[in-house]
Image (cartoon, grey):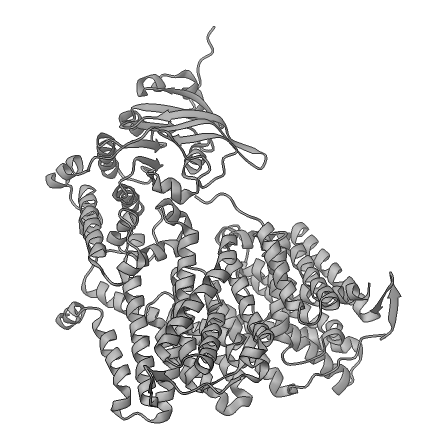
Amino acid sequence: MTPIWSGLSIGAVYALVAIGYTVVYIAYTTFNFAHAQLMMLAIFVSYWGFVVADLPVVLVFAIAAVGVGLVALIEEFIAIRPVKGAHAHLVTTLGMATLLDGVTRLIWGDQVLKVPPVGSDATLTLLGGRVGAVELVLIISVVAIGGLLTLYSRRSLTGLALLAMAEDRDAALLRGINVKFLALGAFVFTGVLAGLTGPLVGPKTFAVATLGAALALKGFVAVAIGGFGSLPGAVIGGFVVGLVESLSGRWLGSAYPTIMVFVVLLLILMLKPAGLFGKTKERVV
Amino acid sequence: MAVFRLLRSVPSWTLPVVLAVLLIAAPYLGIGNSTQRLLLLTCILSLVTSGLSLSFGYAGELALGQTAMYATGAYLAGYLAMNWVNDVLLLVAISAVAALVVGLISGVPGLRLGGWSLAMTSFFLVLLVPQFLDLLEKYTGGAVGMVGIPGPRIFGEKLTSTGFYLLVAVITVGWFAIMRNLITSRHGIAFQVLRQSPVLASSLGISVYRLKLTAYAVGAIPAGIAGALYAYVDKYLSPHSFGFTLAVTVLAAVILGGAKSIYGPLIGAAVMQYGPLRSSDFEQYSQVIYGIFLIVAGTLVANGLAGLVSNALRKLENRFAPPPPVLAVDDDSARTARLTGLPALAGVKLEVQDLKKNFGGLQALGGVSLVAEAGQITALIGPNGSGKTTLLNMVCGYYQTDHGTISLGEHNITGLPTYQVARAGVARTFQTPLFPEDITVHEAVAAGSYLAPYVGMPSSILRLPQYRKAVAQANQQVDQVLQMLGLEHLGGVEAASLPLGTRRLLEVARALVAKPRVVLLDEVASGLDEEEIERLAEIIRAIRDSGATVILVEHNFRLVLNLADTIRVLAQGELIASGTPAEIENHPRVLTEYLGIRQEAKP
């Protein structure tokens, strides 16, 4: 059971990254390759808040949320807004990711920094496996965030407007939806969400400048497994990746996690090419 | 203006040839060692990049596997040079083949799945490179790297550094010449069609899967060659050279240079090699600079640098040579051509039996049977949503058939993929005309004859007589069909920029050059003006008279009554009436269901 808990908790991190990708995908039909770097930035900010500046917990959350939200805002203005099309965004957001990697390295260096857990660092025994209290909080929060966002996107007017936008931007524009503003809001929201969850994720992943690249990749696989544009898919995809990694590492050996994740991805794509929750369109002409 | 004309009259390959000569002659033009090395690395990077541009820019499949093929080529060449035989040319050839094999193996699963799958699987392939290198540590040196690769030799002769540079430059020039010939051949047009509309490609008889796999696999060849050459550059290979960074660099180079351009990759590779890749001089800031560079470059050049150049050229051209009027005056010669110009078409009976189709809970077709005879126009009418287009799409193989059979003469085509239906002789037009951007009317129509006759890639690249003959034949046919439609003066205009009515006529032209046995016309008259409808009607009659089976889906009731030999009426997925125009015109159910005329209740 212990590997399952640890798989779920690292999976929760991947799921968070995948949620970030998905929200941006819904709002812009494009990918923000720098989202994992936003997450990494949040983790570094919480390291700084807890360890260097020794600030109260609430303040750390607030600073991370506002700070990373601001970075997301800047990114929208310099890397997303001026260019059109997923291919061009591929280059600009990749540029943003590299830039954030570089800045992080300049400020905090290359060492692995330990982020202290929020609240207690107790370890519980649950269902026959050991799991840290922070990890448990992380798992529960991710499920809750995924659930709330799904509910929000289906029930609230703003959420529906976002979905309409994902379906057909021009049509949404004609229906009087302020597409640009709404999309910007969604983008900044992903930054704020990364900021808010950073202090929870930090103790699990540590703060290290290569974290962005690693998370980006796994988050992307999570999205591919869950299906592009599906929030529940992103959450479940994240957990699947985490579990596969943790279980294959436990039972097959340390060389296997990446290969097994690849195998699982291939299997799922073979059975459901659009991902677990993706939709296929038959009508083409 | 005279100067501009003069410039345009110079063949388009002049500039590349001049640059190629300069590249090869560079060592004799007094460049320093470091410049020579930079040029060498640019050549190698441009080979990798060019491979990606083939699959990404032309075939429209984002694939990052080039890095893995590059690594394959490099390590294989390095190992063989140390342990077997040290001959650059031989090793280049072996590496090219090995890369092709890796391309095929990694391309098949990704492409079978479609969508973003190839991007995913090839992305993973790159990530697994270090793991494979570790696994084969005995041969590759694992994380330490491969040390002790000997200096390059060719036929036993040792190559000087200038000699090696010359070899790399010549190979690079040679590869770009191959690319140029491939892209400007009929295959290049096929790639463009494929990238912009797989739907259209398959309706022209192109197997989307096979052409994409070909593009991806052929794109592996230059990567393998580049790898073999790279092994000799530093005589040392480190797994760090083949990681994610390289994949990103190659991708950035492709997009910067312009993914859909022949020489763009060379420009992109040069920019990357001179810019970010050199910034290791100030290691600390390299990532920051690289990041800013990507953002700025990505913002400035959405279509790549090559795109900027060709846009500027087009603007100049439009300024000096305004496009011709859309519809030529319909003179007598065009009319005669229209009535007599079509070769005989071997029509075949199309038979549909008890065809059913549901979309979720919605019944689109509920058991329709009908026959369309050769040498006749069979019109299919009915209100919107009655299942007309669904029926056409099922005949073409775009939709799976839930129940029933479709046959062409004796040949059962139920469930065949679209490209095979097209190869069996079914050509069609689309409700919304499909024309890829950036290709001329002549090319767009010629795309219809991609398979008639088909010429393989090798003979196209070498411009063998077989290729020349096929092109001449296709050109003649295209000219003839365009003349019939009165559109021959538009041959050089971009097809996608024409008005709707003209594009509809072009779709008919494209269907005709494939020498179809069955022609499906989907709402071909909507959006046309009186004169164009007149012209269209004559053409449809000419197609029938030349023997083909014509199926006309149309809302213009007058046109249908004028043209059709028999009419089938669909409503809510059922066949409610069929007969001659005279019968249908007075059929009570047709009047209520379709024309909306209420029948007075009889007392």
Front residue (pair B43, B593): B43
Q: Specify the farthest residue to the left.
A: B332
* Residue at (48% x, 79% y) in the render: B79
Residue B492: in sight, yes or no? no
Front residue (pair A130, B226): B226
**Image position of B435 with respect to B295: above or below:** above
Q: Specify the farthest residue to the top.
A: B603
The percent coordinates of residue B96 (x first, y second) are 40, 70
**Image position of B265 with respect to A152: above or below:** below
Name the side, left or right, on which B585 lies relative to A62: left
Q: Quadrant of residue B18?
A: bottom left
Front residue (pair B562, B462): B462
Q: How many marks?
A: 0
**Image position of B574 with respect to B27: above or below:** above
Q: Quadrant of residue B553?
A: top left
Residue A115: in sight, yes or no? yes
Quarter of the figure that contains the N terminus of chain B: bottom left
The percent coordinates of residue B11 (x first, y second) are 18, 68
The percent coordinates of residue A227 (x first, y second) are 60, 55
Q: Quadrant of residue B234?
A: bottom left
The percent coordinates of residue B542 (x first, y second) are 21, 33
**Image position of B480 with respect to A144: above or below:** above
* Residue at (47% x, 75% y) in the render: B76
Name the side, left or right, on which B471 lies relative to B290: left
* Residue at (32% x, 26% y) in the render: B373
Name the side, left or right, on which B423 lies relative to B325: right
